[in-house]
Image (tube, helix red, strand yellow):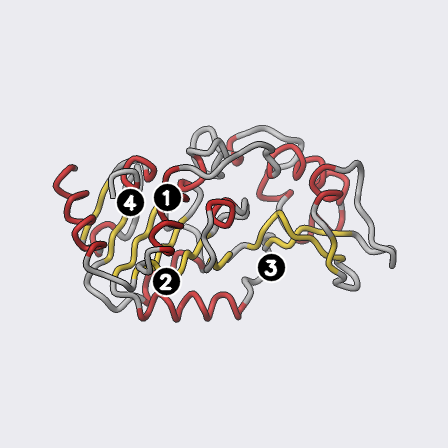
Amino acid sequence: MDEKIAELKEWIAGSDNIVFFGGAGVSTESGIPDFRSVDGLYHQKWKYPPETILSHTFFERMPEEYYRFHRQKLVIDGVQPNRAHKRLAELEAEGKLRAVITQNIDGLHQAAGSKKVLELHGSIWRAYCSRCRKPYPAEQMNHGEGVPRCSCGGVIRPDIVLYEEPLDQDILSEAVHYIRHAEILIVGGTSLNVYPAAGLINYYRGDKLVLINRSETPYDRYADLVIHANIGDVFSQI
């Protein structure tokens, strides 16, 4: 393990074209539960399965139930960026990291100081009207009561990608660009089982693909360096 971290540290020292692609495991060390682990949201009992609640159809039909889930499970007050978030922001400030591509919706990369963050699944810190698309502050959505509504009468919704909805094509294209041209691609805290996001790794053309995850992923055998560990522990050493 120490040898692998030392090799990664050497690669980082010699590069100014690093891209990071991360998932839920980047934020679990800040106290945000992931979706698919044993203790994740998908294994908790609700009246409806979480993957149903987080769908476009459910939001349209039962916004009251959606918002009950949203405020209890998606909004976690007081969380702070962890060692991985902070080190990534430092690498960007040092001119080494070109972009952070994240599947997370918690805004912790920006809170840590990262500037170039591509949010594949949006953010719970932005909101807009589902009818007229007028933007709204996120406070009422995240901490209010009942279903927040726009002045036009439409339901205010989080700026996140729900199930049944496509990813933002502009963000997706920009992510592909950064990955395709990266010298080092570091993939961390993701099982690489959720598509189309996981498929982005296939656009990488370099020879320094790094996978950091506590468990194995379907892409381990294609990586140039695999580290099975907590991502915060690894980033605290690089």
Element under disc 1: loop
Binning the other alpha carbons within 10 Å of mark 1 as few (below 14), some (14 to 19) or many (20 upward) gives: many
Percent x, y of residue 63: 75, 45
Residue 165 is labelled as 3
Which residue is outermost to the front?
94
- Amino acid type of the residue tagged 3 in the rendering: Glu
- Looking at marks 4 and 2 on the same chain, the residue that comes earlier in the sequence is marked by 2
Residue 98 is labelled as 2
The residue that appears at 60% across and 33% down in the rendered structure is 77
Q: Which residue is mark 4?
A: 212
Percent x, y of residue 121: 54, 54
From the viewer's perspective, is residue 28 above or below residue 217?
Answer: above
- Amino acid type of the residue tagged 4 in the rendering: Ile
Residue 189 is labelled as 1
Q: Nearer the viewer, residue 231 or 224?
A: 231
Q: Are marks 4 and 1 in contact (CB under 8 Å)?
A: yes
Work out how far the residue at label 4 is from the one at label 2, CA to CA, in angstroms.
19 Å
